[in-house]
Image (cartoon, rainbow, N blue to C red):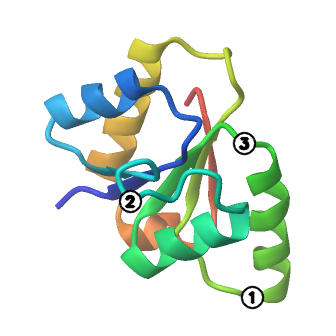
Amino acid sequence: MSLKFYMDENVPRQITAGLRLRGIDVITVQEEQRRGESDPKILARATELGRVLFSQDDDLLALAKERQQSGTFFPGIVYVRPQTIGVGDCIRDLELIAKVSTAEDCQNRVQYLPL
């Protein structure tokens, strides 16, 4: 069973579409009408859903660090700095993470792309 992702609002639609074409379970912030919500609320929602959050938002790195230091659980974040990886490579890296990682592998961790 592959990981499930929760896509932050700043993720290009092509990435979400590419993952879905590869059979990866993805939900977006936009689909849940949560656009504009704060980063803590977005991470809380990903946690509630048991989904790894994928984002290009630097602020989430600080939030993850706070949670790691305080011992507050989160299901994991995959982060990519904007414009450091092409859409196709991003899709391939996320697909690989989804197919070879377990939920436990990602818990309370930040994974950086490109791999």
* In the foreground, 51 or 11: 11
Q: Which residue is mark 1?
A: 71
* Secondary-structure class at tag 1: loop
The tag earlier along the polypeptide, 2 or 3, is 2
Type of the residue with mark 1: Gly
- Viewer-closest of 45 and 82: 45
The C terminus lies in quadrant = top right
Residue 14 placed where, x, y %?
36, 21
Identify residue for label 3: 57
Q: Residues within 10 Å of mark 1 (few under 14, many from 20)?
A: few
Q: Is residue 108 visible?
A: no
> What residue does disc 2 label?
32
Which x, y percent locates residue 101? 36, 56
Amino acid, disc 2: Glu
Secondary structure at numbered mark 2: loop
Q: Which residue is located at x 75 percent, y 65 percent?
A: 64
Q: Amino acid at mark 3?
A: Asp
When the figure is inspected, residue 80 is found, relative to residue 32, above or below; the finding is above
- Quarter of the picture containing the N terminus is bottom left
Question: Circle 2: is it few (<14), some (14-19), or many (20+) Cα within 10 Å?
Answer: few
Point out residue 102 in the picture as x, y percentages from the top left corner.
35, 64
Using residue 1 as the reference point, say whether residue 52 is left or right of it. right
Q: Report how far apart the C-alphas of labels 2 and 3 lie in the structure.
A: 19 Å
Mark 2–mark 1 Cα distance, whole angstroms, equals 28 Å
Seen at 45% across and 81% down, the residue is 48
Mark 3, secondary structure of its residue = loop
Quarter where residue 84 is shown:
top right
- Comparing labels 2 and 1, the label whose residue is closer to the camera: 2
Kindly indicate the quadrant of the structure image that contains residue 93: top left
Q: Position of residue 40 (x, y in %)?
A: 71, 70
